[in-house]
Image: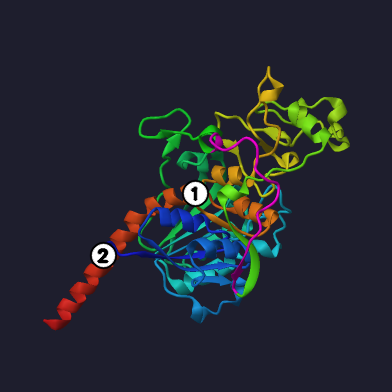
């Protein structure tokens, strides 16, 4: 039996990374930390409450940090996002220092940081590089880093993320792509929106979550709900429906006639090209963000649109279930919280299939190191008895 690789998941959210690592097998969640109640509840519904710490990470004392083989997680990234303020003094951008504190005390063999693509251009990333230099807080860890496109690892979504490996068991390169747009030798073809959601009903079954609540950490939260219970529609206005009907696959606000443009779009002739956009069936989606249920926020209209038959069009944004599919959450995954809270969990998550690709890539390095440690320990015991 293979020895489990123990994992601490920081800023875990709903557990996208933990789901991906568990799908890779041999990984055992030891601790998870998340301050948002609904996200912590979702994590607990899927992976257990006993090791989830629903608390501000800075409140966990050093003595409570367990030793672990691995730490994974993504400090909040809104400050680095193109949609954020990019304020260097934003306290959210400094939470990665708490991540470093955990690394110091848990002493993992490997840590993984996931963040937005802009993180590599941030002052915090430069400080992280300094921390792993001679005399730094993380001296002894070797960093490798890069930008990974989730589509290249099996997600039907063009989501680009910074991935950083810190290793004290030797340099670990970035994982090779497992998928490609043209089915290159040795890879599978990119998965598409059609692959992800074409089997789901075109007409959502409800507009509201079903009744139900659960007790978590002594607090009541809505849920837990199966993904199939999240096929929730909206009640758009007549004008919104008319706008949707003018947008073909791959199109957006520039396909709307002048009379249907709100003033802000009439006056802004450039930029924000994907808003009021419609997905394409046979391509990956663009990034699924936290407000995917609002077409004015991105390319979130359902891909079904018939040029010649208006009756064969689906004029609505994608549902929570469809968004979860595009993020590669399994249908049996359970969700807690309100509609908006669950949408945030979905949009903020690491696609589990990307996490699985990372976990499978790291596993040989970790298992080889564990085997070496066991061998050294056995030799030490043998030598002490002779």
Q: Can you say whether 358 is above or below 299 in the image? A: below
- The residue segment tinted magenta is 197-217
200 drawn magenta: yes
Q: Which badge, 1 or 2, comes first in the chain's sequence?
A: 1
The answer to whether any part of residue 137 appears in the image is no
Q: State left or right for residue 16 relative to residue 110.
A: right
Q: State left or right for residue 229 relative to residue 270.
A: left
Asked whether 115 or 19 is in front, the reply is 19
The numbered disc on residue 330 is 1
Res. 169 image quadrant: bottom left
Q: State left or right for residue 82 relative to residue 74.
A: right
The answer to whether any part of residue 357 appears in the image is yes
Residue at the farthest top position: 308
The residue under label 2 is: 372
Packing grade of label 2 (10 A; few <14, some 14-19, many >=20) is few
167 drawn magenta: no
Residue located at (68% from left, 53% from top): 339
Number of marks drawn: 2
Quarter holding the N terminus? Answer: bottom left
Q: Main secondary structure of the magenta part?
A: loop
């Amino acid at each position: 039996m293979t020895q489990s690789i123990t994992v601490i998941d920081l800023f875990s959210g709903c557990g996208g990374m933990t789901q991906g690592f568990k799908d890779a097998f041999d990984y055992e969640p030891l601790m998870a930390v998340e301050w948002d109640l609904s996200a912590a509840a979702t994590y607990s519904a899927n992976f257990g409450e006993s090791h989830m710490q629903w608390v501000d990470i800075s409140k966990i004392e050093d003595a409570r940090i367990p030793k672990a083989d691995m730490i994974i997680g993504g400090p909040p990234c809104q400050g680095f996002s193109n949609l954020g303020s990019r304020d260097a003094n934003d306290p959210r951008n400094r939470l990665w220092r708490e991540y470093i504190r955990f690394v110091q005390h848990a002493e993992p063999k490997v840590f993984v940081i996931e963040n937005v693509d802009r993180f590599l251009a941030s002052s915090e990333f430069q400080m992280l590089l300094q921390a792993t230099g001679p005399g730094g807080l993380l001296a002894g860890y070797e960093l490798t880093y890069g930008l990974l496109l989730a589509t290249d690892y099996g997600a039907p979504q063009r989501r680009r993320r910074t991935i950083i490996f810190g290793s004290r068991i030797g340099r670990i390169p970035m994982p090779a792509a497992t998928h490609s747009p043209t089915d290159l030798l040795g890879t599978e073809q990119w998965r598409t929106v059609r692959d992800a959601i074409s089997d789901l009903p075109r007409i959502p079954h409800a507009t509201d979550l079903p009744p139900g609540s659960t007790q978590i950490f002594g607090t009541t939260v809505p849920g837990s709900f199966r993904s199939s219970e999240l096929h929730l529609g909206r009640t758009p206005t007549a004008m919104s429906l008319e706008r949707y009907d003018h947008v073909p696959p791959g199109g957006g606000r520039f396909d709307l006639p002048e009379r249907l443009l709100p003033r802000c779009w009439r006056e802004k002739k450039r930029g924000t090209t994907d808003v009021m956009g419609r997905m394409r069936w046979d391509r990956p989606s663009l990034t699924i963000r936290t407000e995917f249920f609002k077409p004015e926020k991105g390319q979130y209209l359902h891909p079904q649109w018939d040029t010649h038959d208006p009756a064969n069009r689906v004029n609505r944004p994608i549902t929570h279930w469809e968004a979860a599919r595009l993020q590669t959450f399994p249908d049996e995954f359970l969700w807690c919280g309100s509609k908006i809270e669950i949408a945030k969990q979905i949009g903020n998550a690491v696609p589990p299939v990307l996490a699985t690709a990372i976990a499978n890539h790291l596993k040989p390095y970790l298992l080889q190191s564990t085997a070496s440690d066991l061998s050294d320990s056995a030799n030490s015991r043998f030598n002490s008895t002779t």
